Amino acid sequence: MSMTTLPFIRRVSACIVCALLACGPAWAGTLQEDDSRARNILEKADEIRFPSEGFQVDVNIDSATADGNVEKRKYRILSKGNESTVVMVLEPASERGQIMLMKGRDLWVFMPNVSQPIRLGLAQRLTGQVANGDLARANFSGDYTPRLLRSETISGQEHYVLELLAIDRSVTYHRVLLWVNKANYRPHKAEFYSLSNRLMKTCSYEGYESMAGLRRPTKLVMEDALRAGEHSVLDYQSMKLRDLPDKIFTKDYLKKLQ
C-alpha cells in the first residue's frame, strides 16, 4: 500500500464513523418506538383476554388423549390484576376442596387433608395441555418482553405477529409467538416454546362473545405439538366483574373456602 493512499483511507473511515454516530440516535429511537408499539399491542390483546379489574369466571376443561379418552374438569377462578389469583376445583367431586393460590409468581396448592400448602411451578401441568400458569396468570404483559416480528394475513384478516420472551425462568413459558388481529386487537392464536426453543403446544382463541363488558374469547383450544391428537378445550363461562378484597388472596382465608 502506498503512502498516498493512507490519507484517503483515513478520510473514508472517518466519514463512516461519523455517519454511524449520526445515525445512532435515530436507530435507538426507532427501536424504542418498535418496543413501545409491541407493548401497546400486547396490552390491548390482554385487555380483551381478561379484565384488568377483579373478576370471577368458571372454566370447563375437556382434555382428550390420542386414543380418544376424555377427562373432564371444572374450575372457578377469582383473579385481581395479574398478581393475585385463586383457582378452586369444582369437578371432579373427589378433588373438590383443592385450591391454588398465586401471589406474584409464587403458587401453592391447598388440599383438604394436608395441613401445609404445597409449592407448585407455573409451568407444571395442571391437566391435559393446560399448565398451572394458564389459569393462574391473567395476562402476558407482566411476564414477557414483546417484539413485533411481522404481519401476516389469515383468512383475509391482517394480524400482528409478536414474539414474547420470558422476563425470567419463573414464568410459564420461555417464548411465545402471538397472532393479534390488527383491526380489533383480538388474540387469534399462540405458539408456546420451551427453553430449548422447541414448540410445545399451540392455542387458538375462539368463540368470541360479550363477557364482563367486552367481546372476549370463550373457548381456547390447546393442542400438543409433540403428541398428535392430544388436546384440551377450555370453555369460559359466567365471567363477571367482582370487587375482591386482598384478604381473599391469603393462606388463612383459603381455609374458609375449602
Image (cartoon, rainbow, N blue to C red):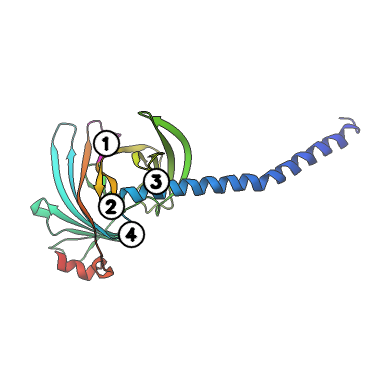
Question: How far apart, in angstroms, are the residues tagged by discs 2 and 3?
Answer: 32 Å
Residue occupied by mark 3: 174
Residue occupied by mark 2: 213
Q: How many marks?
A: 4
Q: Are marks 2 and 4 in contact (CB under 8 Å)?
A: no
Camera-side mark, 1 or 2 = 2
- Taking the image as shown, residue 184 lies to the left or right of residue 63, namely right
Q: Tell me the SS state at disc 4.
A: loop
Residue 122: percent from left, percent from top: 31, 52
Choose between 88 and 193: the one closer to the eye: 88
Residue 153: percent from left, percent from top: 41, 30
User: What residue is rendered at 13% in x and 59% in y?
Assistant: 97
For marks 2 and 3 on the same chain, the one whose residue lies earlier in the sequence:
3
Which residues are drawn in magenta? 220-229
Residue 54: percent from left, percent from top: 28, 60
Determine if the magenta segment contains residue 224. yes
Residue occupied by mark 1: 223
Residue occupied by mark 4: 81
For marks 3 and 4 on the same chain, the one whose residue lies earlier in the sequence:
4
Amino acid tagged 1? Glu
Q: Residues within 10 Å of mark 1 (few under 14, many from 20)?
A: many
Choose between 158 and 123: the one closer to the eye: 158
Amino acid tagged 3? His
Q: Residues within 10 Å of mark 2 (few under 14, many from 20)?
A: few
